[in-house]
Image (tube, rainbow, N blue to C red):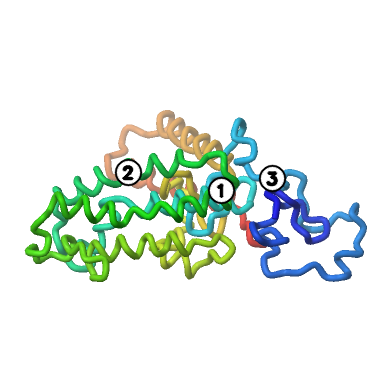
C-alpha cells in the first residue's frame, strides 16, 4: 500500500494508516454503500482542509509533536509515522536509569552509580544510531530495519565484561540472565516488545506493556514534557495560544501587584494573593485544550 494515500471513508481527507484503508479516526470502520454513494463535494463532519497531511510531511514549517502513549500529533491530529513512533518508544525506554528504576522503586535497592554510568555509556551510541539509520527507507521498511537491530547480546556482553562478578552480586539490578527477573530480563523483554511493534495494533494495552501511563491532563496542559518531543494530554490537545494568554494574564497580575499593593501588606498576605491569582492559570490551559477523539 502506498504511503500517504487518502482515507477510504467518503469525504475524509486524512491519511490512511499503514496496511489499512482508513485513517486513525475511522479505525475499524468500513465504507458503507451509502457513504460510497455520497457526492464528493458534500461537506461531511470530519473533513477539514488542513488535515490531509502530517506535520512531518513539511518539516521546514512544522514537525509532529506527540505523546508516545497514543502516537497522535496534537497539531495535525494524525498518527505519526510508525518509524518515528517506534524510535521515540525505544529511546524513551532504553535508558540506564529508566531500565533500573523499578529495582529502586519496587525492590528498594539503591542503584549502583557504576552500573548506571556503564549502561548510559553503552546505550547512548545506540540512540544516535537509531535516529540516523536508514533515513531514506519508507516508514514501514524502516520499522522492519529497526526491529532487526537486536542489541540485547551486545548490551549484556558489554555489561558482563565490565562486571565479571555479576553472578556473585546479590542485587537484582546486577542479574544479567536474560531469562531471569533482573536487568537482563528487562533488556530481553524490551527487544521482544520492539520486535512485536505494530502501529496498527497500538492501543492502551501495548502502551501499558511499554511502561507508559496515560498522561495527566493537568500536567500536560501545564507544559510538562515526556520523552523527546513536546507532549500533550492524551485526552485533550493544547492550543499553543494558551501560552500567550497565560503570559498576558500573569504579566497583568504582576502589574496589578506593583501598582496596588498597600504598604500594610505583610509577606503572608502577599503570598496568599499571589496564590489566588495563579488559580486561573491551569483553567486557561484547560479552556484552550480540545478533544481529538470526537
Above or below 74: residue 179: below
- In percent of width and height, residue 275 lies at 38, 47
Which of the image's four quarters has the C terminus? bottom right
Rendered view: 60 above or below 64: above
The nearer-to-camera label among 3 and 2 is 3
Q: Position of residue 11 (x, y in %)?
A: 82, 56
- For marks 3 and 2 on the same chain, the one whose residue lies earlier in the sequence: 3
Looking at marks 1 and 2 on the same chain, the residue that comes earlier in the sequence is marked by 1
Q: Residue at x 71, y 47 (%)?
A: 51
Q: Residues within 10 Å of mark 3 (few under 14, many from 20)?
A: some
Q: Secondary structure at mark 1?
A: strand
* Residue 282 seen by the camera: no
Q: What kind of element bears circle 3?
A: loop
Judging depth in this view, the residue of 189 and 281 nearest the camera is 189
Residue beneath disc 3: 53
135 in relation to 45, above or below: above
Picture coordinates of residue 266, whole percent (x, y): 28, 39
The answer to whether 78 appears left or right of 12 in the picture is: left
The residue tagged 2 is: 271
Helix, strand or loop at mark 2: helix
Quadrant of the image for the N terminus? bottom right
Residue 162 visible in image: yes
Residue 238 — which label?
1
Residue 8 left/right relative to 257: right
Amino acid at each position: 500500500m502506498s504511503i500517504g494515500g487518502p482515507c477510504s471513508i467518503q469525504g475524509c481527507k486524512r491519511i490512511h494508516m499503514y496496511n489499512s484503508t482508513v485513517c486513525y479516526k475511522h479505525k475499524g470502520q468500513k465504507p458503507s454503500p451509502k457513504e460510497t454513494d455520497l457526492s464528493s463535494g458534500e461537506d461531511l463532519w470530519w473533513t477539514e482542509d488542513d488535515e490531509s497531511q502530517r506535520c512531518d510531511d513539511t518539516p521546514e514549517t512544522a514537525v509532529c509533536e506527540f505523546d508516545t502513549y497514543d502516537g497522535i500529533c496534537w497539531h495535525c491530529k494524525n498518527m505519526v509515522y510508525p518509524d518515528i513512533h517506534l524510535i521515540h518508544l525505544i529511546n524513551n525506554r532504553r535508558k540506564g536509569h529508566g531500565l533500573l528504576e523499578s529495582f529502586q522503586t519496587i525492590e528498594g535497592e539503591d542503584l549502583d552509580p557504576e552500573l548506571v554510568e556503564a549502561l548510559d555509556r553503552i546505550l547512548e551510541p545506540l540512540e544516535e544510531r537509531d535516529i540516523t539509520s536508514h533515513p531514506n527507507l519508507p516508514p514501514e521498511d524502516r520499522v522492519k530495519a529497526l526491529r532487526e537491530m537486536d542489541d540485547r547480546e551486545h548490551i549484556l556482553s558489554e555489561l558482563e565484561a565490565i562486571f565479571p562478578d555479576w553472578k556473585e552480586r546479590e542485587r537484582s539490578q546486577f542479574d544479567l540472565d536474560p531469562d531471569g527477573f533482573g536487568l537482563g530480563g528487562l533488556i530481553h523483554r524490551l527487544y521482544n516488545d520492539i520486535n512485536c511493534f505494530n502501529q496498527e495494533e497500538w492501543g492502551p494495552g501495548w502502551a501499558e506493556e511499554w511502561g507508559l501511563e496515560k498522561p495527566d491532563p493537568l500536567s500536560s496542559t501545564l507544559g510538562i514534557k515526556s520523552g523527546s518531543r513536546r507532549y500533550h494530554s492524551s485526552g485533550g490537545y493544547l492550543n499553543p495560544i494558551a501560552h500567550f494568554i497565560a503570559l498576558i494574564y500573569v504579566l497583568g497580575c504582576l502589574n496589578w501587584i506593583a501598582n496596588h499593593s498597600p504598604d500594610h501588606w505583610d509577606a503572608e498576605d502577599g503570598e496568599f494573593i499571589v496564590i489566588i491569582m495563579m488559580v486561573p492559570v491551569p483553567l486557561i490551559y484547560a479552556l484552550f485544550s480540545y478533544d481529538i477523539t470526537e
